[in-house]
Amino acid sequence: MARERARAERTEDPRATERQHARGRLTARERIALLLDAGTFTELGTFRRHGASGFDMERRRPYTDGVVTGWGLVHGRKVFVYAHDFRIFGGALGAAQAAKIQRVQDLALSVGAPIVGLNDGAGARIQEGVAALDGYAGIFRRNVQSSGSIPQISVILGPCAGGAAYSPALTDFVFMVEGTSYMFLTGPDVIAAVTSECVTQEELGGPAVHGSRSGVASFVAPSEQACLADVRYLLSLLPANHGEAAPHYEPDDWPGRACDRLYDIVPSDPRRPYDMRAVAREIVDDGELMEVHERWATNVVCAFARLDGHVVGIVGNQPLSKAGVLDIDASEKAARFVRTCDSFNIPIVTLVDVPGFLPGVDQEHAGVIRVGAKLLYAYCEATVPRVQVVLRKAYGGAYIVMDSLGTGSDLSFAWPTNEIAVMGASVAASVVHRRELADALDPERLREELAAAYAAELMHPYNAAERGFVDEVIDPRDTRRVLVEGLRMLRTKERPVPARRHGNPPM
């Protein structure tokens, strides 16, 4: 048995490991060793072999069939894993390999534990034809069955092409590594033949593309070692399944700590930018954030953090990028994050400083109404504790969409610098008094006077509080304490059982 197990680990080709390392990539077992706590991996299906025939396949029947599967511990908590072995058939998926992956998918869902897929494969195994395609179908079905029940994490550590790309797309988080990983449905050769476009694998589906343009990659890391360390950290922030809370740790950071630096970080002038991530770091425990989609749709920040030792999801407009407006990509990014938090019992803190939705013909024609409604739907549907904080401006429909009390936020607080209104004072004056301005001898001066009058009447900091649209106006330095106390109160919030199978969001 020991001899056969060693044979399975080294593969039939004595130079296969050397070639994998020459590509700048680790082997499947080396990756699993980095992901899991030392000595905790229990392997399943070590001696599995394919039963295909033809194309000389009868003579090539290596153990594992190109994927290593099993379970182990991450920070002492159970996690299932499968890792493609590129040394065997280029990691390509056949019927036996698919069956092994489906086996650990079923086990992970049945026991309520996260599953991590370490992807490094060349797609479907051509020699097995439709049997390989059917194997993908079974994997995809299990991805959907597990969605919202257990965390599913995909790590792209080499090629992930064709049908193989759809499984990561169905999971909760996708990691990529600079220089060695890429994803696409149709490769450069086929694109060149069909459209005459010449493009490299990196240009077509590398981490730079999926991390900043397509939004497919949730995280991008500089190396496999850094990537797998990030996966371990993410798992420490997630519950094992939808029926549990995320892990809690007693904080070293005092929950009642004053946040005096917020006075320096956020200018009172609503036209001056600042970094919303700096605000979030000042508020959360130890200044630690794990930002999701850091490089994509940068006008909104989505991040996991801890408050009082409990995991929270932070959603915040980013004034440093497009003045923090909501657009199609930002709405899509935030909606996905809100739904993920709601799936896994993670309270949501929304930090609002939004001038509205991005105006423009391109946005309207591309469906900003439909996509903006995704974020609205996600917040309205979410049943986890939700707290809104309005820092400066919150204008128009974007104010509603950013988790207002009317959409079901449990608590809403505002800084004394807040301006909650249908639109900015100058624009409002131009719309309401357009006839007077058209007839005025000095329209600019009159517009300034009318804007000041509008702001004084409807945009002063206590206007929304007077009308019950925010619960309290707070001192910015008390933001951390107020959030901690509010979330402590909401910890026993009852989450209603849905009265329907599911809604029909504008997907």
Image (tube, rainbow, N blue to C red):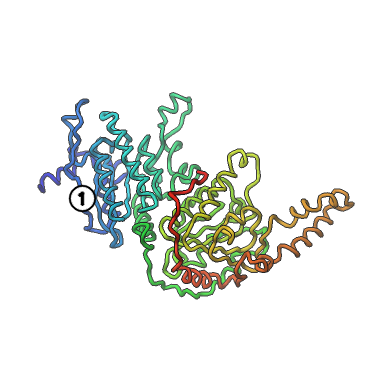
The front one of 220 and 388 is 388
Q: In the rendered image, which quarter is residue 470 located in?
A: bottom right
The quadrant in which residue 454 appears is: bottom right
Residue placed at 43% from the left, 24% from the top?
Answer: 193
Quarter where residue 458 is shown: bottom right
Residue pictured at 57% horizontal, 48% vertical: 372
The amino acid pointed to by label 1 is: Glu
Q: Is residue 435 left or right of residue 288?
A: right
- Between 94 and 319, the one lying in front of the other is 94
Q: Position of residue 173 (x, y in %)?
A: 40, 50
Q: Residue at x 53, y 74 (%)?
A: 258
SS of the residue under disc 1: strand
Asked whether, in this view, residue 344 is left or right of residue 443, the answer is left
> Neighbour class for label 1 at 10 Å: few (<14), some, many (≥20)?
some
User: Residue at label 1?
Assistant: 43
Tell me which residue sits at (38%, 59%) in the image: 238
Q: Please determine whether, in this image, residue 482 is positioned above or below residue 241.
A: below
Q: Nearer the viewer, residue 178 or 272?
A: 272
In-image side of 258 versus 69 (left or right): right
Rendered view: 178 above or below 493:
above
Q: Residue furthest front?
A: 499
Count of marks overlaid on the render: 1
